[in-house]
Amino acid sequence: MKLEQIYTPCLAHAAYYLESDGEVALFDPLRDPRPYLEKAKENNATIHYIFETHFHADFVSGHLDIARQSGAQIVYGPTAQPMFEAIIAKDNQEFRLGKCKIKAIHTPGHTLESTVYLITDENGKQTSLITGDTLFIGDVGRPDLAQHVIADLTEDRLASMLYHSLKNKILPLDDTLIIYPNHGAGSACGKNISKKTKDTLGNQKKTNYALNPKLSESEFKALLLSGLAPPPQYFPSNVLLNIQGYTSHEDVLKKSNKPLSISEFISLYQNANPILLDTREAEQFAAAHIPNSINIGLNGNFAPWVGEIIRNINQPILLICNKNTEQEAIIRLARIGYDGVLGYLENGFETWEKEHKNIAHSARINAHEFSKLIENKSTHILDVRKKSEFDSQHVIDSQNIPLNQLESQLNQIPRDKPFILVCVGGYRSMIAASILKKHGINNFVDIRGGISAIKKTPITLTTYQEPISYL
């Protein structure tokens, strides 16, 4: 038996490839079917099952395309009601794969249909538990996501379900089991997920607050429900795509992976009301970009930030990319259901620069320049990190508007004096800069390297206080 974790850092997502005796089961695959199909082909194996732990909110699963191309059966846990053919497993139902077994254990709480899968190897030993969003390393799945899709479902009710799922279904299992969750640190599906992507159940029983057997149900719910940030706005749309179905990945690539001449690009911009999405690195965008374009770089958490910033999942999009990264951008957009790419500017910004004189810029300063500017105590600083990041450490007297709230709080931004944008490393501050410039706000600079660079300046100890006591 071979069980492999396939981790995608930009989504903090883990899929799983299980193979035994030439038969394969996939767990929570991403939308692009090629890596999974190619892996099975290389191993001269056949994909028999695609197990889904739940209806995902943060990505569009590859279950439909993989099933169509491989003939595999899709499996969900009890209560799931997909709008396509699938096996709806009973609680504790077992599936044989080669010489191993997979048991579906219903663990409602993150969602109603949430299910974990217990793996038994060829020797009859229970070895692994694929936990989806029921149990992470150091955390558990937040119980407030499904309520955004099912109107009469409350987070309190789901939290109660999760308490009993953990207590009655997970805690009794053997400590030697390896826990394989659907996400690692950075995912919005939990509030404090570890950077580790696997661990033993025994160690999690010792270290994961949610598995403390002494917690009462009310104590568990109080811990679980405190400090939950609003879920990303694109999550409900992804859930519905996973329930209802979606355009095949192959068709999305055929439609979107299309080079556009400068005249075609301008014509679509004038007539299709698209977003101009520039996926180059922040420094390139700052130096020169197409006016009114939004910068979300492929070198960061590209897809999640697209989902936060571009609020309409069906929004037409024109891409400006570095050469040979266009298809990667389209694939990453499709992973979260953004299938509206009309094409990309052939040869990227270089084409625009050669043939069009209308070019915009965004001013940046380095941390040492910033240290000189803040000697003037009237300098205004706008920090676009999450509130939790800001609360732990920030420049004294700075203003916090999290990036995902920036466009809705433009009235809070000073127009009558210069200000400075800051984030952790300059990635989010350039996204913010592009949004502000699109709305005609230009009286700012952002800090190259962000907070990380500022910490290395001589003024660090007098510029920061930790923890913040006056918030």
Image: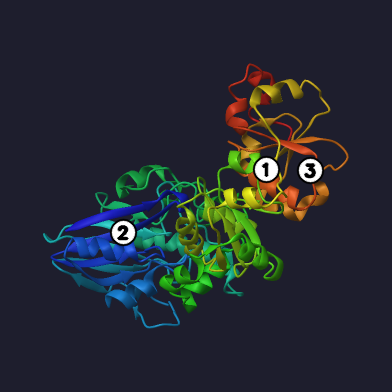
State the image coordinates of residue 148 (x, y, percent, origin top left): 60, 68
* Residue type, numbered disc 3: Asn
Is residue 37 found left or right of 334 in the rendered image? Answer: left
Q: Which residue is mark 2?
A: 16
State the image coordinates of residue 358 (x, y, percent, origin top left): 73, 50
Above or below — where is 96 with respect to 139?
A: below
Q: Which residue is mark 1?
A: 384
Give me the C-alpha separation between circle 1 and circle 3. 16 Å
Is residue 125 found left or right of 14 in the rendered image? Answer: left
Whether residues under marks 2 and 3 lie with C-beta atoms below 8 angstroms apart, the answer is: no
Between discs 2 and 3, the one toward the N terminus: 2
* Residue type, numbered disc 2: Tyr
Which quarter of the rendering shows the N terminus? bottom left
Between discs 2 and 1, the one toward the N terminus: 2
Whether residues under marks 2 and 1 lie with C-beta atoms below 8 angstroms apart, the answer is: no
Q: Residues within 10 Å of mark 1 (few under 14, many from 20)?
A: many
- Residue at the image position 37 percent from the left and 64 percent from the top: 28
Give me the C-alpha separation between circle 2 and circle 3. 46 Å
Q: Which of labels 1 and 3 is toward the front?
A: 3
- Between residue 295 and residue 421, name the one nearer to us: 295
- Between residue 216 and residue 67, name the one nearer to us: 67
Q: Which residue is mark 3?
A: 442
Give me the C-alpha separation between circle 2 and circle 1. 35 Å
Q: In what element is the residue under mark 1?
A: loop
Q: Which of labels 2 and 3 is toward the front?
A: 3
Above or below — where is 439 with respect to 156?
A: above
